[in-house]
Amino acid sequence: MSLRIGVPSKGRLMDKCFDWFAARGVTMERTGDDREYAGTINGLPDATLVLMSAGEIPRDLAAGRIHLGVTGSDLVQDGLPAWDDAVEVLAEMGFGQADLVIAVPRAWVDVDTLDDLDAAAAAFRRTHGERLRIATKYHRLVREFLRAAGVADYLLVDSQGATEGTVAQGTAEAIADITSTGDTLRANHLKPLSDGLIHRSQAVLYRSRRAPWDGPARTALDALRQRIDG
């Protein structure tokens, strides 16, 4: 079985993946138009390029449907329970950096830390009779982080759209979301907590621990490891 490498199917992340592999002697190219998920790979015998969304890659790695995959560490660590039992980090790729942070309205002048957030959540519960809502796409990472910090009386609400807009829309009081520059937070009158960094994410090349590692796939992996290490 050939080595199946899952790569994001569009945008800057795909382009940067292609550049990263090209620098290691493996050329990848998307073929067809934007509606086709087809591509070619050269410079690595017995390897097949699989184009898919970054969000699908953790699932397919865990299921063993692809051998290697490039996606954000935030998506893997949030999407896969006991993620390091399912995948192994082969290389941190040095692009796609972003921070997953807790952010609150700038108008909350007395809320700058997690302890402040805990106090604000308790006060919100006393005043309104319900829990303070935090909108996020990253339920596992946020829940574990807040539990470790001792923050209680909150409710995570799922956000599938623009998380930064949920406070202005009145569907949440705070958010936990990915940011690279902070510009979108500021544009939506939000501020990150000073100790509210949950995870520093970047693009990572992962190896599936559950894919079939027969002769051709193993040989191709060994050749790629030599180029990464070199």
Image: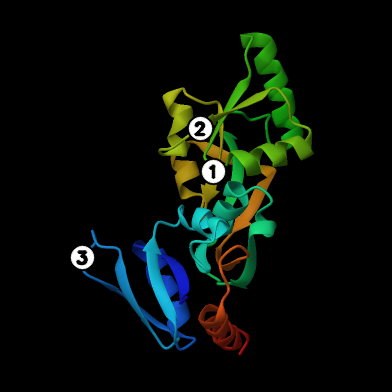
For the question of whether residue 192 can be seen, the reply is no
Look at the image and name its color scheme: rainbow
Q: Circle 1 is placed at which residue position?
A: 177
- Describe the element under mark 3 as helix, strand or loop: loop
- Residue annotated with mark 2: 158
Q: Quadrant of the C terminus?
A: bottom right
Q: Residue at x 23, y 58 (%)?
A: 35
Label disc, if present, on residue 33 of the rendered structure: 3
Instruction: Give the mark count.
Output: 3
The quadrant holding residue 142 is: top right
Q: What residue sits 46% from the left and 71% below the top?
A: 5
Position of 115 with respect to 46 (left or right) is right
Residue 223 percent location from the top left of the image: 55, 87
Mark 1 and mark 2: span between their CA atoms? 11 Å
Above or below, 203 relative to 77:
below
Distance between mark 3 and mark 2 Cα atoms: 33 Å
Answer with left or right where residue 32 lies relative to residue 87. left
Three-letter code for the amino acid on which mark 3 is drawn: Asp
Residue 203: give x, y in percent of width and height: 53, 65
| Spatial CA span between label 3 and label 1 | 32 Å
Taking the spot 69% from the left edge, 11% from the top edge, the residue there is 126
Q: Can you say whether 47 is above or below 157 in the image?
A: below
Classify mark 1: helix, strand or loop. strand
Mark 1 crowd level (few <14, some 14–19, many ≥20, 10 Å Cα): many
The answer to whether residue 56 is above or below residue 168 is below
Q: Nearer the viewer, mark 1 or mark 2?
A: 2
Residue shown at 44%/79% (left/top)?
Answer: 47
Task: Label 2, secondary structure: give it.
Answer: strand
Mark 3 or mark 1: whose residue is earlier in sequence: 3
- In this view, the residue farthest toward the left is 33
Residue 71 in sight in this render: yes
Disc 1 + disc 2, Cβ < 8 Å:
no
